[in-house]
Amino acid sequence: MKPVKIGIIGLGTVGCATVNILQTRGAELTARIGRSIIVSHACVRDPSKPRDCDLTGVTLLEDPSELVTHPDIDIVVELMGGTELALELSLKAIAAGKHLVTANKAIIKAIREGLAGNRIHSVAGIINGTGNFILSEMLDEGRAFAEVLGEAQQLGYAEADPTFDVEGIDAAHKLAILASIAFGIPLSFSAVYTEGIGNLTAEDVRNAEKLGYRIKHLGIAEHNSQGVSLRVHPTLIPRSQLLANVHGVMNAVQVQSDAVGESLYYGAGAGGGPTGSAVVADIIDIARSLETRPDQRVALLGIRHDALKEVPLLPIDAIESAYYLRMQATDQPGVMAEVTGILGKMGISIEAIEQTEPMQHDTQATIIMLTHRVIEEHMIKVIRQLEALDTIMGAITLIRVEHFNTRQSA
């Protein structure tokens, strides 16, 4: 069979890692696929710039539009980053009849194919390696968010503009795809509640640890009798759970399903090698199926488009969760009773509560509490009542708390 020719847009960390994997594993891939894979073209902004991959025999182009419509290219690999131009070029490649690969993670295959015989109840996990690296460093070294973010950028884990990573947008994109595959629903990115990690403090990280928890930036998709909830936010999880012990740039996704029960998928989630490996896996999938009729290939979302189900998408205030609260209060008698009284009137039980004594000459104390599970709408009403008290200073910090292995699936 004739070789499969690849055109890559972007030869940064991931692009060069992809080239290196395809070149160093060339003979083995040919044996597995039955045809060779050749990187024939690449598009870069500066062809003279030194790169960490061997580009011998690769035609370098400066116009990406030329690459995506080039008649000799079978598969376009988009690794340039960004949104508007990347989307424009991707659509142009598809219109030109090209197969398209963009950077993603291999967990999709596990859910789409490995758990195809299961009814999946929930998918929850750490799906952005950059955010997990930052939180791990804040815990292990006691460093501030901004300092660790700068290091992540220097190490190549975070982009120059880190918004997609630290604000949870990248994780929300991935969660929407995972939920679609897991539950057989249309892609619903706009329905994902998204909260970043930029407001987390080293104090909250330390408090969580003292209480027996760790803070992780999680994507959580749940399917119950009311509908589907999709959310990305910082979350306290018990230190004893597997997800709490995923550190650095590693990713992990925990799936709860009827036949298998609880399963965990773990691997690196940032950096050139892990991402390049996921890209190559998609290239191999396409290369293997080039001679297969389109209607006989594995559906991209694991289910035919006409079989996707419309289900209610639940807003964040409809979810049920436990909560970590931190508030500043005036150091005077009766404040704690006033705070707990408001929670009690709303039927919210307290699991743990702690008041730190103010420093000398300070008039404010810190109150930290963990609640039992409650509908978020009720918790928000309590927060508003507490913040309206003369004895509570400023905004109250709220972080959701989850105990995944004790949850009851719908």
Image: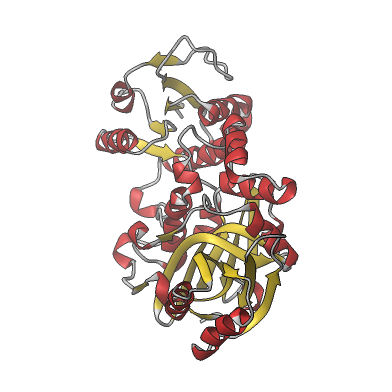
Which residue is most to the front?
A: 361
Q: In this view, does 385 lie to the left or right of 141?
A: left
Please tell me which residue lies in front, 342 or 40.
Answer: 342
**Residue 312 percent across, percent down from the top left:** 33, 74
Q: Quadrant of residue 360?
A: bottom right
Colour scheme of the picture: secondary structure
Left or right of 329? Residue 295 is left
Q: Name the foreground residue: 290 vs 69.
A: 69
Q: Which of 109 and 71 is in front in this view?
A: 109
Give above or below for 388 relative to 280. below
Q: Number of numbered discs present?
A: 0
- The residue drawn where x is 41% and y is 19% is 44
Q: Which of 244 and 350 is in front in this view?
A: 350
Residue 208: image quadrant is bottom right
Q: Does the rendering let one see residue 302?
A: no
Q: Is residue 256 above or below residue 158?
A: below
- Residue 366's place in the image compared with 245, above or below, is below
Where is residue 398 drawn, in percent x and y? 53, 67
Residue 62 location (% of width, % of height): 35, 16
Residue with the most extreme top position: 48
231 to the left or right of 191:
right
Residue 304 at least partly seen: yes
Q: At 47% across and 9% down in the image, what residue appears? A: 48
- Residue 344: name its quadrant: bottom right
Residue occupying the point 37% across, 66% down: 185
**Residue 8, percent across and down?**
43, 27
